[in-house]
Amino acid sequence: MSEIEREAMEYDVVIVGAGPAGLSAAIRLKQLDADLEVVVLEKGSEVGAHILSGAVLDPSGLDKLIPDWKDKGAPLNVPVKEDNFYMLGEGGEVRIPNFPMPPLMNNHGNYIVSMANVCRWMGEQAEELGVEIFPGMACSELIFGDNGEVKGVVAGEFGKEADGTMGANYEPGMELHGKYVFISEGVRGSLAKEIIAKYVLQAGKEPQKFGLGMKEIWEIDPAKHREGTVTHTMGWPLGSNAGGGSFVYHLDNNQVYVGFVVHLNYKNPYLFPYMEFQRFKHHPMIADLLECGKRVAYGARAISEGGYQSMPKMTFPGGALLGCSVGMVNVPRIKGNHNAMLSGIAAAETAFDAIKDGRSGDELPEYEVEVRTGAIGKDLMKVRNIKPMWSKWGMMASTVLGGFDMWCNTLGFSLFGTLKHGKNDADATQPADKFKPIDYPKPDGKLSFDRLT
């Protein structure tokens, strides 16, 4: 496409993705030097449009980025008041007591939030500092410099046909060049995949693992609403068919987030994650909560679950990978937003030092060191064996041994060392002729719905 002429704009730092990682990087850069030229490119129609996370937010990242976030009106309005864990069977449930849980599993001090609203607020903070944010600008192509470094991206290109040729309404977009380029696209972003492949960043690392997280927002009977209550479950309906579990978070205004996560290394190709979620809502405990309620929003997203041992090299000539482009989710806590924010802060501080020293287009090794040895690395190291345990030994064994291992890691050691994942999720799925199709109940249109609805 070299024959296409595009307008080019020059910046100090170009950031792809207005999620918690990218916005944290932009804010931190302007905090360090108000004269830096920083741009954030967001494919959604507005900041927050593509953020799908009904989350319990650990505020540690926000505390470091904007210590006075409460005074600035950050939308963290529902502190966690109650933590519940259940093991489900088809007709009932067993409460798992909180006292044997490792301290890191405690949600007190955290907040039930809409990450879309948190990111919108962060976007406002960034713009007040002078960050340029361009929504509706998907980045379709990387721009490379003479020495093979990433020097920018193509954004706002429209009108390509399915085969890559230019259609009648083709618009070439523009090039945005930076001394450094930060990729914070989220899980399996197209540019991140290209960079990881080109610079062989996954070499020597374990394969990344993935889950599918589905979420619905329900308005429920006020008599059943318990603001600030967090509930997690394991077991039915997945059982031994797949790893995963659920979350139910009571936020304000009589609303709850009902979510379901399925690990994508399941063996049976007939397993249908969406229908497992719909079936889950018919469990007596969940059905009673949602009865006479109304589903008001829904969506799904991929989750990176490989943890510490699956994180690729994060730096490349000309930039760095941030947040879920690396994979920084703490799987047992179902939390990654705090680590995404911390990664953005670390990348910004490293780039600031490099630019101050007159550098550009090179690697930022200090960023990698900070992520792996600082707060992010310490958070992920404590839980690094949970996902491989679950994959190898199943739910019950991994619950017991994983809890023991997290306690040991809290004390600074592990009897298991660092377990390996071994194979990717696709290799775990077996041929269909080894299994029988799963007969899923037809959605009733009240609690459960087909995908078209």
Image (cartoon, rainbow, N blue to C red):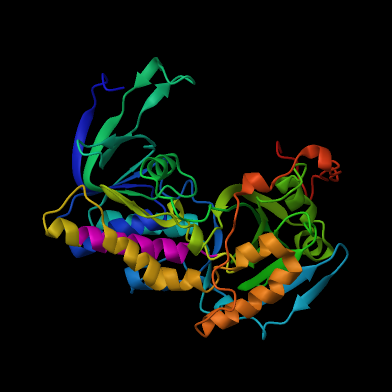
Residue 108, position as x, y percentages in the image: 55, 79
Q: Residue at x 64, y 71 (%)?
A: 230
Q: Quadrant of the C terminus?
A: top right
Q: Residue at x 72, y 64 (%)?
A: 393
Name which quarter of the figure residue 386 lies in: bottom right
Closest to the observer: 244 or 217?
244
Q: Quadrant of the N terminus?
A: top left
Residue 146, position as x, y percentages in the image: 19, 35
Is 338 inside the magenta-drawn segment?
yes
- Regarding residue 62, the answer to whether it shows in the image is no
Closest to the observer: 77 or 231?
231
Is 136 inside the magenta-drawn segment?
no
Q: Residue at x 34, y 32 (%)?
A: 156
Chief SS of the magenta region: helix
Name which quarter of the figure residue 397 lies in: bottom right
> What's drawn in magenta, residue-wise?
335-352
Name which quarter of the figure residue 312 lies in: bottom left
In the picture provided, is 178 more to the left or to the right than 189? left
- Regarding residue 115, the answer to whether it shows in the image is yes
